[in-house]
Image (cartoon, rainbow, N blue to C red):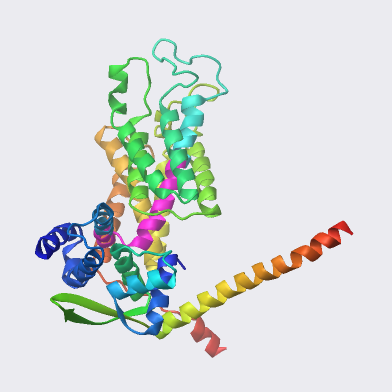
Amino acid sequence: MRSALEARYRRLLAWYPKQWRVMHEDAFLGTLLDVADAEHRGTPTRDECTSIMVHGVAARLDRLVVPEIRNAGSTIALTAGTGIAVTEFVISSWAPWLAGNPAPGSLTQIGPFYDTGFVFAGLWMIALIAALSGRWAVGRVVLVLSIAAAIPMPFLYRLTPGIWPVDNATLVLLVGFALVAIVGRPRRGVFTGGAFVGWGLLAALAYCTPSFPYGQWASSRSLWSGVGMFWYGALVLLATAVGFALTRRWNTAFTIVLSLTPLAVTFAANEIQGIVIQNGTAAAITIPVGIGVLLLFLYSSGRLILPTRTRRRSLFKSVR
Amino acid sequence: MREPVFWILTALTQGRQHGYAIIQDASRLSGGAVVLPVTTLYASLERLEKEGLVRADGDEVVSGRVRRYFALTPAGESRLVLEADRLEAKVFTVRSQLSLRPALILGGIA
């Protein structure tokens, strides 16, 4: 009985990475068997199976991206995704300042909405509220739903002519942010709420380009066809990350890199589709971000040791 | 400080303990309110070890099973004392507020 139970536990522990198992498997297994004996059990409980799976996956993620960076990246991704989804909804999907259908020949309204942005804005808002109220498990499920909802969108217009989906590039960006948000645990508090508003305003700024059809309808494509606000923003953030790296604030630098990854992937996707972002090339962002992500993986797995910061303040104090 | 961490550190105050003994002590000390799953225990112990609040204190094999012992570090003890002080201050505030309540009500009526 015991050997069968031990074999089952060992199979379950395969969810953990090999490095972890080498160090902890026997001690962990000993405790699992002690608990099973005390409860007179011959099989693992369902809760144990789920918990081992969840913790095992988390331990694997820890070796890919360390938890501090993953959680900080999750906060940024959640707030940026919500900010962009809500702005897209207000400006493209809803546009309450417009009267009537802006393109009667080719666009069919879904109730008061011009495109499917209301679906994503709703789901992202639920995820943000779930995170702020300490129910992140719900937030994660909702973001998985938002990814599932994004998958059929590129085929929507062909299947239901007249129904406009959210633009592909915006969808790629939202899916990327959802993935980064899901793998971490966002911070709760005023900062998170404030960051959502900030990202929303920045997304609104990205709409407000010289090519913005003032007083007319701006589809979600307008986010990517202006003067490349997102490109310039990414460049500034990239320079900031380099600045932090030069001062050996690695966690901050890597958090920026992780948060920029969805944007870099979107630029690459745009380039593949033959959509050239004005005033900059995708490579200028995607290559440095790619290098940064590679360094992050090496750092998290312990294969890259980075020099730590030296504190000079105490030296100055003693000189004075 | 999260509830499982608080009880793990408290369980270790009486000396080095192995995983299952920590689970038993946490349950006993919390009056059965905290039942630590093994996964939570080891995830917490790993984090506490990284933070220098707990250290692994050797493995022993008992009836063919490995038992890893853990012990509280001086930093862990200080952290627990701080937490106890914080909780004590909270309880003191609540108790003093409750004891003031009748006087305030009477004052309000007067």
| A24 or B18, nearer to the observer | B18
Instruction: State which quadrant residue A161 falls in.
Output: top left
How many marks overall?
0
Q: Residue at x 34, y 36 (%)?
A: A145
Q: Residue at x 61, y 70 (%)?
A: B91
Q: Is residue A94 visible?
A: yes
| A5 or A241, nearer to the observer | A5
Residue B6 x/y as whole percent = 44, 71
**Quadrant of the image for the C terminus of chain A?**
bottom right
**Quadrant of the image for the N terminus of chain A?**
bottom left
Q: Residue at x 43, y 53 (%)?
A: A186
Indicate yes or no whether the magenta region holds residue A60.
yes
Q: Which residue occupies the extreme front position in the image? A: A40
| A216 or B97, nearer to the observer | B97
**Magenta-highlighted stretch: main secondary structure?**
helix
Indicate yes or no whether the magenta region holds residue A288.
no
Vertical comparison of A276 with A262: above or below = above
Vertical comparison of A239 with A117: above or below = below
Magenta range: A59-82
Q: Residue at x 72, y 68 (%)?
A: B99
Residue A299 x/y as whole percent = 27, 65
Please give left or right for residue A14 compared with residue A114 in the image: left
| A123 or A249, nearer to the observer | A123
Please give left or right for residue A306 compared with residue B78 in the image: left
